[in-house]
Amino acid sequence: MSALVAAGYGPLLARLLAARGIGVQEVDAYFEPSISDLANPSELPEVDHAAEVIHDFAVRGDQIVVFGDYDCDGVCATAILLKAIGTVAKKGSSPRAFLPERLSEGYGMNAASVSRMLAENPDVRLVVTVDNGINSVAEIASLKGKGISVVVTDHHLPGEELPVADALVNPKVASPASLEGLCGAGVAFLLANALVNLARSRGMYSGPLIGGPLLVLAGLATVTDVMPLVGQNRIIVSEALKRFRSLAPLGLTELFSRASRSVSPTLTTKDFGFLIGPRINAAGRLASGMEALELVVSTDREEARELARRVDVRNAERKSVEQAMLDGALERIVPGAPAQVIDLPDGHQGVSGIVAARILERLSSAGDGALPVPVCVVVGGHGSARAPDGYNVRDAFVAADEALDRYGGHAAAGGFSVKPGKIDRFRELFCAACARQAARIPPSERALAKLDAWVSGADLTLELADWIQRMEPCGEANPEPIFGIRGVHFAEIRPLGAEGRHMVATFRDRSIPKAIWWNRGDMVEELRAHSAAAYDIVFALEANDYIERHVEIRLVDVMPSAAVHYQNAQADFSIT
């Protein structure tokens, strides 16, 4: 940090950089990630062999099926390889796409989805998986037994046994450290470039470069799949954001024009993560991911415009279902429980994960000083879980194994199926497991947010906001800077937006900028009722260009000043 200050960076900015592992040697590349530093596709093990296998099938005109997934990463990865394979394929032939149905078949390659894929594509000679396949050992063996070749590209953790495929590309199996964090579309992007490079070297392709639109898809998927935004991923996402308006596939530009009124030439990770990504995901959650895929690969403007309208409508339906489920779930919260296991028999399975995340957000910013706990939302016996830092929901599933048919996931999120009639037993076992975990979590790891620093209103300048904007793309492993101010008093609190969904506030200390608290209009009356109380606020800083450029703060949490949850946070100090 001292070296950064000596290099001319202010102490607060230096603190932000140092907390993200950025020193003087890395700072230039951090602020200016360059496409020239993208890895050569050949650095990813097996990618060249996979390209050779696909190339040979494509130039012969044999039928190839790209077997994807219904979420944004799977859709983008599928679109990337459809484009690349179609570019090098024999004239008159083209690859086909297959996406499993979330509600009837579930994730990835399983018996049900493979059966439908074969029925719809009886002439298939090569299956190329994207964003799945690494744990489909039996299904791939079955395809191989039918004389169908298989190339697996994935980024998920493998099980004890790897599938026997014609080629297998997965950075979690073999990869230099710089590529371990790729998402499914990131892997597909490298493979696509390797495939086109191979075709060009063999004189089989001499057309235009295709990498730009595919880079945008890889960047979008990297953000929505919550991959670490460091190293290669940072370059991919940064370039995708900068080049979106000029290089994005037609369908994505039409979708973004419906989702945003922004005229800024450069997008941010919020545009990917909160506007475009959720709309792509909504199709797979409520209906079929093929709706989103058709949009992404469309090359006709009128068709793309209509498909964007449909996907946007699907997202509106998702929001409506989500709100109804959230309202019902909040009524079922058990105060003080070591975990929340909420059964919503009339809900929609495709939205359960979002609702679990929303409840966790509410528990994390309730303003009552209580610490958040893991949340499970169950619909029709199928559930999704989300957990705050320090917990491990998969370990809690293991402890509740006797009440579950199957489960999977990682520390922060997972999915499961409850045995018939065992929801109460699952709740008992899961809560007990979470209570044991909570007893072992140090207070510093249970902070409601990762604070960078306690500050004063005087620290919140336009210059700082501009530097923070340059820290984009922010996300996993490169978090958006989060600040806190202790002991503030609200001056004015009012609802904002349709039906008062959001909250806007000012403070008695006029050096503190106006605050917006998105999706927390429910806190307006609560805070008004205690207007004399002092609060600790936690927030992100943003520049706003409306009328005259100024700074605003986006609230993340509000709690009584007597609360202690941030006292042991890693940045328990004030810059000023």
Image (spheres, grey):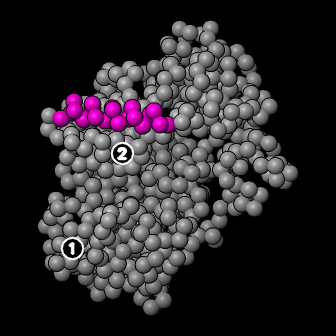
Q: Is residue 222 left or right of residue 2?
A: left
* Position of the C terminus by quadrant: top right
Is residue 462 visible in the rendered image? The answer is yes
- Number of other residues with Cα within 10 Å of mark 1, as a class: few under 14, some 14 to 19, many 20 or more: some
Q: Residue at x 49, y 71 (%)?
A: 175
Q: Residue at x 18, y 81 (%)?
A: 147
Residue 218 lies, with reference to residue 520, above or below; the image says below
Kind of element beneath mark 2: helix
Foreground residue among 461 and 570: 570
Give the residue type that dot 2 points to: Asp
Q: Position of residue 213 (x, y in %)?
A: 48, 65
Mark sitting on residue 395:
2
Name the residue carrying label 1: 141
- Badge 2: few (under 14), some or many (20 or more) residues near its Cα, within 10 Å? some
**Vertical comparison of 484 with 133: above or below:** above
Q: Taking the image as drawn, is residue 310 in sight?
A: no
3D distance between C-alphas at marks 2 and 1: 30 Å
> Main SS of the magenta segment?
helix
76 vs 529, nearest the viewer: 529
**Location of residue 448 by image quarter:** top right
Of residues 138 and 62, which is closer to you in this image? 138
Q: Residue at x 43, y 49 (%)?
A: 277
First to last magenta residue range: 422-441
Q: Residue at x 27, y 31 (%)?
A: 428
Q: Position of residue 442 (x, y in %)?
A: 54, 36
Above or below: residue 282 compared with residue 22: above
